[in-house]
Image (cartoon, rainbow, N blue to C red):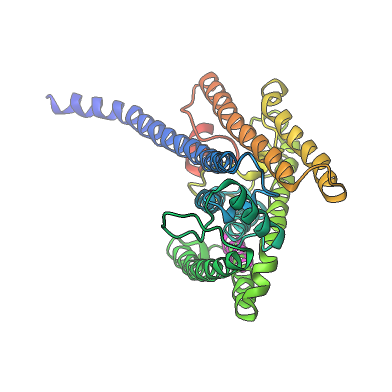
Amino acid sequence: MTSQPKSDVDGADAPAKAAADERQDSDTLAKSYRYLRLAMVGLLLCLVVAVIVQTKNQGWDFLESVSAYYYTPAQAFFVGGLIGLGACMIALKGTTLVQDIALNLGGAFAAIVAIVPTGRHADELAAANACDEAGTPLLTEKASTELACPEPPALEDATTANVDNNLWALIVVGAFALGAAYVVARKDGTLADGDARRKFWWGFCWAFGLWLAVVIARWASLEWVINNAHWIAAVLLFVCIFVVGSVNTLQVKREPSGDGSREGPPPVKPPNAVGETVGDLIAVFGEKQRNDRYIWIARGMLLVAAVTIPLWWFTDLITLFVVEGAVFVLFMVFWAVQTFELERELKRSTKAAGVPPRPPPTSTSTDVQHHAHS
């Protein structure tokens, strides 16, 4: 007599329990997304502080570029911050094939920028002079009671050893990552589906091509890598961000209301794809009032870059450090403001619709999206 009512109660509670479990999963995804984005800001902030402290220690004598701080005690956060940024870019999932490829390549370029310094003799000479004038150590200083500032040739020798070691580490890890991606794709059924298989091989071939290019460059000439890889990777990193941003802009034009509606069928997204893309730099979601807070920061950043880069390139009015520093700080402010703006708008929209919270638009998992629209 008692078992039937209990079964009915259990049956009635099952949908509520399932909804609560899915709400918790969605909240976990949203928090993971938030922490990943804020981790990028934290890494870059550490680099900013390290550069400021080092500049203060050398009598507020700014070096010619942020990259030149590779040769100072700020090196740890210069390298670590950019590698961490690259890892976050790779972890963030694009909503289209083009976005995903650009994010993955951009993450790899960020790592190359980190481990291969500028290779400019002017940067090495400026760092050595700052050491002489302010009495602060450079990366080759040994533990001693007296400071001995190295000359540019000593910095070049230390840089060569660092680049060779770290580049081989990056090559080995890259090979492991490519192999792991293939194994995972086989196990999760990606290679069994026609469209998913095509997208996987496109992304895999681009990543493999970059890895192979790095291997060939290293075997051909380490000196060439040291002299050129930093600038090539830096330019291509910017190109990747621009490409992802352009793709996001096209998507935004098809969803002006921010409700996720699109002209035509929605793009296919892998399961559990969490995170916004770097293309959010110029993307617009939701109504205009909400966007003004961060979209104007993004526009200001692009305007600053458009003004300062020609001033640095064609005149002696400013240094590359000013260009990098201005864009750097504006990007951090933009990224942090947008993170909380998107999350706040998401909570308002899901509360009004009476559905469980889910990760921000263009980054939600397929399962969560299905529940939100059911």
Q: What residue do we see at 54% from left, 67% from top?
A: 158
Residue at the limit of the structure toward the bottom, as seen here: 220
In this picture, residue 226 sits left or right of residue 173 = right
* Observer able to see residue 374: no
Q: Which of 7 and 140 is in front in this view?
A: 140
Residue at the limit of the structure toward the left, as seen here: 1
Residue 141: image location, x then y, percent = 49, 59
Magenta stretch: dominant secondary structure: helix
Residue 363: image location, x then y, percent = 56, 41
Span of residues in magenta: 195-206
Q: What residue do we see at 72% from left, 23% from top?
A: 288
Q: Which of 1 and 233 is in front in this view?
A: 233
Q: Nearer the viewer, residue 309 or 177?
A: 309
Residue 202 within the segment the image draws in magenta: yes
* Observer able to see residue 153: yes
From this view, report whether residue 147 is shown above or below residue 212: above
Residue at the limit of the structure toward the front, as seen here: 146
In this picture, residue 256 sits left or right of residue 107 = right
From this view, report whether residue 194 is shown above or below residue 270: below
Count the marks: how many? 0
Q: Which of 108 and 245 is in front in this view?
A: 108
- Which of the image's four quarters has the N terminus? top left
Residue 80: image location, x then y, percent = 50, 52
Residue 181: image location, x then y, percent = 49, 64
From this view, report whether residue 8 is shown above or below residue 103: above
From this view, report whether residue 267 is shown above or below residue 179: above
Residue 139 within the segment the image draws in magenta: no
